[in-house]
Structures are given as C-alpha cells and as structure tokens.
Image: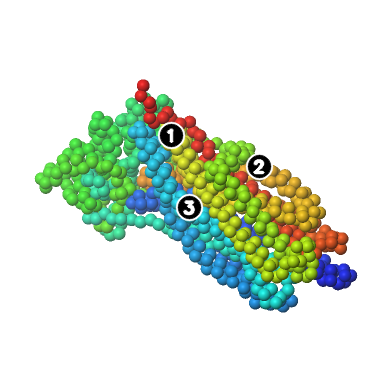
Amino acid sequence: MGFFVKFLEDYRNTGMTDQKVLQNFYIMSAMILLLGIIYILLYHPYFFKMTRKGMQLRIACCNLIYRKALRLSHKALGKTTVGQMVNLISNDVNRFDNSLIFIPFILTGPFQTAITIAYLYNVTNLGLQWSVFVGSSVLLVYLPFQMYMGRLFSMLRGKTAILTDERIRLMNEIIPSMRVIKMYTWEKPFAKMVEIARRKEVAKIKITSLLRGVNMALFFVSAKIIIFLCLVAFVLNGGTITAQIVFVAISLFNNLRQSLTLFFPYGISQGSEALISIRRIQEHSESTLNDITFSLTPGELIVIVGSVGSGKSSILLSVLSEIPITSGKLKVRGKVAYASQQAWSFAGTVKENVLFGSIYDEEKYRRVLHVCALEKDMQLFPNGDQTIVGERGVSLSGGQKARINLARALYCDADIYLLDDPLSAVDAAVSKHIFEKCIRGYLKDKVVLLVTHQLQFIRNAHKILVLKDGRTQALGNYPQLVNAGIDFIKIGDEKDEKKEGAGGGDQLVRTGSVKGERSGHRRASSVSVHSAEDEELQNYIEGEKAQIQRGEQQRMGSVKAAVYWLYVRSGGGFFLLTILVISNILTQLLFNGSDYFLTLWTDSEQGLYQFTWVKNLDRDQFIIIFAALVAALFCLSLVRTTVFFTVCMRSSITLHNRLFESVIRAPIYFFDNNPIGVLLNRCSRDMGLIDDMVPSTAFDAVEIFVQLLGVIIMNGILAPIILAPTAVLIVFFYFLRRYYITSARSVKRLEGITRSPVFSHLSNTLYGLSTVRAFGAQQTFEKKFDQYQDSHTASWFLFISATRWFGIVLDWLCWIYLMAVTLYMTFQYDNLGMSPSVIGLTVSSAISLSGMFQWGVRQSAELESQMTSVERVDEYSHLTPEPNLESMPD
C-alpha cells in the first residue's frame, strides 16, 4: 500500500506524464490483488487444518476420559465426582477446538514484530529509523503485559473450572433425586445451594470478562497509539510526513495489530486454558485398606459387617480388582458376579435389565425372579417384564431396583457372588425371603460375600468379618465372635448414614487370599461376555425399543428476533443499553475521525489543504488534536467493552437463574421423560457457551457492524463512486448469508442435540460403574460411547467445514470488490481530483472493508449458531410448573 501511494505521488509530481512511473503504479496495483489471492489460498487451509487437529485432540481426550473413568477406583471417583467428569467432556476438552489455531501466534507474533521493526528501520527512503522504536516501545510494554494476562487467565480458568464442577455436581445429584426433593419440599434449600455455587462461579467469570474487555479495547486502539507515537517522534525529529510514510506504517502496524494484539493474547489465554484442562484430566487419586486376610471355598457364606467408612464395600471392590493391591496377594478363581450397594439400571425393559446380555433361559429366569421376590412385582407392572425402566431406574422404587440388581447378578450364573447390602432397601418379610430362598438356597453351592446391616442373619453365616477403620477387627463364626466379646448390638446401632461406595473405596495394602474353587475345573476370574451376547447387550443398551425418555427435539427455522431481544433484555435495563449504543457510535466516530484527521495532517505537510481551517493549524496543534483523538478513543473503547461484557454477564446470570428455577419447579413426569444428559447439556455445555463464547462473538459482530457503517459513510464522503460496488457487495453478502445460515443453523442445532447422548452415557456409566465392570461390559459401553462420539463428531466436522467454505467464498467476493475499487482508482486517477493520501485512505478502507465484510458476515452467522444455546436454555425456562409450594389457608 505504501508503494502504491508513493507511485501516486510520483505520478502526480511528474505531471502525470512519466510512463515508467505509471507502469510501476500498475504493477503495485496488481501486487495488491495478487497478495489478496495468496492470503486466501493460505489463510483458510491453515485455519481448517488446525481446527480439525483441535477436534481430533478433543475426541482423543474424550475417549481417554471415558476409558479412564471405567478404570477409576470408587475412592478416586468419589473425589472426582460425576459432575466434574461431565464438565471435563462438556467444557474443558472444548478448549482444544480453538487452542491449536492461536497457540502458534505465541511464537510468530514476536517474530513478525521484529521483522516489521527491522523493515521500517532499514527502509531509508522513508526516513523513520529511530522513530520506529518509539512507536514500537508500546509493544515492549504490551508483550510482558500479555504474558501476565495469560497467567491471570490461566489462574481464573482453573478456579472457574472447579466452581463449574461444583455446580454441575449439584445438578447431577439434584436431577436424579427430584422425587425425594419434591416429596420433602426441599426445592428451596437445593435451589439455594445451586444459587450459591453459581454466584461463586459467576464472580470469576465476571473478572475474566472484564479482562477480556480490556484486551479488546487495547486491540482496538493499539495500532493508533503506535502510529501516533511513531509519527510524533518522526515529526519532532525534523521529518516531514508523506502519504507513503503514513500508509506503509499503517499497513504494517495494522498487520501487527491482528497478530500481536489479538491472536497473541488469544494464543496465551487459549494455551493456558488448554493446559489447565490437561492438568484436570490427569487428576485422580487412591487410598488404603490394611490387614485383611481370609479365604473361602465353594458353599461358604461370609458376612461382612462394620460401621460407616470401615471398608466393607472396599472388600468387594478389591475382589473385583477395582482397588489396586500395593502389597499382599489376592487370588480369585472363578467367574464373579456383583450386586452393587447403589442399585443401577439402564433405559430398557425389566427383562433386559435382568438378562444384561445373557442368553435367555425360561426356567432359570423364572427361578431367579422367584428367589429375588420379583414375581409379584411382575404382576403389578403394567407390561410385566416388558415394562420400560427409565434411565437409572426412574420408574422403579428403591426396593425394586435393588432386587432387579440382585437378579441380574444371579442370572449370570457365576462362581463367586459379591452382594453389597442387597437387603437394606426391602422390608423385613422380603428380606427374609431373599436370604432364605436366594442366599442360602439358590447360592448354597457358591462362594458368597455379603455386606449387610441385617444382623439377624449373621448366625447363619459360615464366617463373619468385622471391620473397623479399614482393618480386620474380628473374623470367625457367630459363637466364636460372641465368645471373643464382639458386641453385635453396638454394631447394629451404628447405622450407615451415607453410601460407602465412594467414601470407603480403599487401596489394598496387605491381604490374604480369597479363593473360590469349583470341583472339576477352574474358570477365569475375569467376567467374559461372549460375542453373541455382546450383540444382544448392544441392542438393549441402545434402548431403541425401550426408551421411556423421549428424544431431544430439534427446532427448525431461524433463530427468532425474540431470542436476541431476550438476551439483550436479560442483560440490563434501558440505561445500560443506552450507554452501550452511545459509546459504540462515539467510538467509531473517533476511530474514523482519527484516520481522516491523519490524511488532513499528511496533506498539510505537502501544502495541500482540503479545508480552510486546516491552514491555521501548526504541527504542535496537529499533534495535540491527534493525541486527544487517540486518548479519547482509548477511554471510550474501554467504556464500551466494559459495559458490553457487563451486559453479557448479566444476561448469562439471568438465563441460568430462569433455567434452574423452571427445572426445579417442573413436575416429576418431566424428569421421567427427559434423559439426564439433555438437562446436563443445557446446564453445562449450553451455559458454558453463553458464559464464554456468546459474549466474544456478539462483541465481534456488533463492533464490525458499527465499523462497517463508519467506513461506508467515510468512503461515501471521500469517494461517492465506491458506494456503488459496496451496495452490490452488501446485496451479495445478504443472500449468501441467508443461503449459508439455513444449513449452518440446522447443523449447529444438530450438533447440540448429538452432545446430549454423550453426557447421558457418561453419567449413566459412572453411576453403574462397578456393575459394568463386574459383568465385563466395558468394551460394549466403550463401543457405545464411541458411537455417540462419532455422531457428534460428524455434525461438528460438517459445521466447521461449512464455516470454512463460507469464509472462502466471502473472501473471493471481497477480493473481487477490492479488484474493482483498486482498478477504478488506478485507471481513473487522472479524473478523480483526489490527493494521494485520500486515494490511499480510500483503497486501504476498501481492503479493511472487504475484510470486515467477510468477518462480520461469518461472525453474525456464528452468533446466530451460538444463539441456539440461548434458545435451548430459554426453551427449558418455560416449563409448566407444579402448583405453588405454599398454599393459602382456607
């Protein structure tokens, strides 16, 4: 651009007759267009490939998290929480999608800065030399400042992630427990807990948003500050400003403005957040059991008793190899079946939950139902054993879930049975029936490890293991322990008040051997599910014929204007919106005004005056006015970004509050009919987008729209002829955006819908983790998770491909527009009667206008895609509520 303007000046100074100068002028015009083509050919493939690599990295991390979750001990899982795991795959891993795009700019930004400074210093015909270092001194302050901001973003991201984990953990516990919460009218206390967690989370997000606003303000004015300092130093050193100097400096420093003051901070913040996510993925821990020694043979029953946290469940988990052994020996011979303390079921029929992929045997099936006291329940179920069981058994009572859980273990026909308190959820009569018919009858020839608090049954055990603080307190039969002074009445009074599966999981330090031998031959200790059974298991896990929950519905059509107005209205009142509108208008006036004032200053240095009042200004006055414009621009830009991100944060807070208030007041059938993943998707991923991505995208869209208006108005004043191709470009962009957004919006909604099964599957797996591992179904569940991941990946890859295609098409249209403006200015320069500085400002504005056009259209389309998250959250903010919690007296 600088050489283009220089040849304009030379052409004008030679009286417009020097053909060599004119030839060079044409070559510079062609170079501008050629560089535009090279930019298109390099820019979009780079962004597409880096986005694709980021997607692949995210997919790999999701699979790593899921497979790691399948191997977690219960102690580690208890410390991690299901909410944190859901947050990891809903928010943390998504940092990788964009991080790979910007991280390279951490290196290329400073390198490009050094090249630019060296070039400006060594181009002697400009005469800038040491003035360049004065302007570039801003960058010397800016780089360490951004390093500090990167560390600050990293720290805030880590703290925000912990607080988000806590909120998602609460939601993950509240949603499945809504029956109990509503039974005891605990909606308000639990809502208060979520409100407190959300308030802490938002406090950190607010700080991040304000810092992001400061960064955006610096990005907006950085080039102006650098150019101002550079030119002032040059003028005070006796130099004379020319159009070539101005536009070379503007072109090069504007390039630095994008790479160093936008992409460089993004690289630091995205890299820091990705590093925090990697560290969070790596966090898990273990703990210990000690001095546990016993052995069993087929036909023996051992009852394990003890107080809360004594390690009863951990004994069973150690047999399942859920808890690693650091010393001692553990020998398990035979097939193992497990009935967990926390009864688990999946979305399928009662029969499918009992069979769990095993081949159906009518006689064995009926006998299992009888000994588990399920026959009467089958008669009471609306469709018998074909009755649909909702996700995690939402349609079953606690006793029914426990007995189905026990029946599943019995039906697999194992050698060793690990029963974790299966009698606690049933009444005395059913408890006696199960103990007599099932444990002492059906399993009389098996090895049985029974954890129970029903001490009336311990007299019938072959061995009793009493635990205290993870150690053996006593081991023997009932008479031996009574004679040893064990007070079973005291043990019976110590009721478990919390589930031990998470808190009691310990690492085995020293053990004896647990043996389960069968006469004739020995089976492998691991549970094997054969290939024929895998297919059947796969079918019912899919739940295609057994879904009580309805699938998530996809909306059609454009995002309504009411959704945008809802987002704006939720963010503040009339006062804040007025400040936002006024600050945007004034900021753009100052931005364009400073550019135009610079052309007046440049022309005055050459003795050209567009207005009479310019003649009366000396250099000092030009410097003072330009300094005032840049200072006012920075202040107003800071006000604009601060107010904008404040409005966005208030919108996020309001939308979340409405969502949660609506969900917790929804009737119970809503929770029966909607999988937990659908709700968690809105509370985690959609709210994460509203908290983080929507404000940035909305700011870009609004800022670019205002800049477009400013540039169009300024170009219309300087060169009215440019308005014609600009109008044509606007029309093309309008129809192209309509064509693109129709597909992109649907793809984005599809991407949101395909996320929900991933969250549901992870949450459901973690709640039934021990059962899944006890029955050896890990590979089947991994395969299903991969299928859900593939479905989501297909829609996401389609979205990023469509977005990049749209960007390429827009850039080619912008290049055609730039070609039209450049060629017109080149061949009609003689007839235009404009100074070289005005021509340079017009062409550079056309370059920036074309870039803003394509970026603005893309960001507006991206904003509409992201506003589907607002739409999805708002959809669940209008659920039909239950009657009021408090009723008026008659």
Please report the residue visible at 10 percent of the width from the left and 45 percent of the height from the top. Answer: 483
Residues at marks 3 and 2, CA–CA distance in whole angstroms: 32 Å
Residues at marks 1 and 3, CA–CA distance in whole angstroms: 27 Å
Which numbered disc covers residue 742? 2
> Is 364 above or below relative to 332?
above
> Is 529 above or below relative to 115?
above
Residue behind mark 3: 205
Return the x and y of residue 881 as percentages of the image width and height. 45, 31
Residue behind mark 1: 665
Task: Using the rendered view, name the quadrant where residue 233 is placed.
Answer: bottom right
Q: Is residue 743 left or right of residue 666?
A: right
Q: Nearer the viewer, mark 3 or mark 2?
A: 3
Q: Is residue 797 visible?
A: no
Q: Is residue 228 visible?
A: yes
Q: Residues within 10 Å of mark 1 (few under 14, many from 20)?
A: many
Q: Residues within 10 Å of mark 3 (few under 14, many from 20)?
A: some
Return the x and y of residue 539 as percentages of the image width and height. 48, 38
The single residue placed furthest to the right in the displayed view is 17
Which structural element holds mark 3? Answer: helix
Going by the numbered disc 2, the residue's amino acid type is Thr
Viewer-nearest residue: 306 or 155:
155
Please report the residue visible at 61 percent of the width from the left and 52 percent of the height from the top. Answer: 583
Which numbered disc covers residue 741? none
Quadrant including the N terminus = bottom right
Between disc 2 and disc 1, whose residue precedes? 1
Residues at marks 2 and 1, CA–CA distance in whole angstroms: 35 Å
Q: Is residue 179 left or right of residue 714?
A: left
Going by the numbered disc 1, the residue's amino acid type is Arg
Quadrant including the C terminus = top left
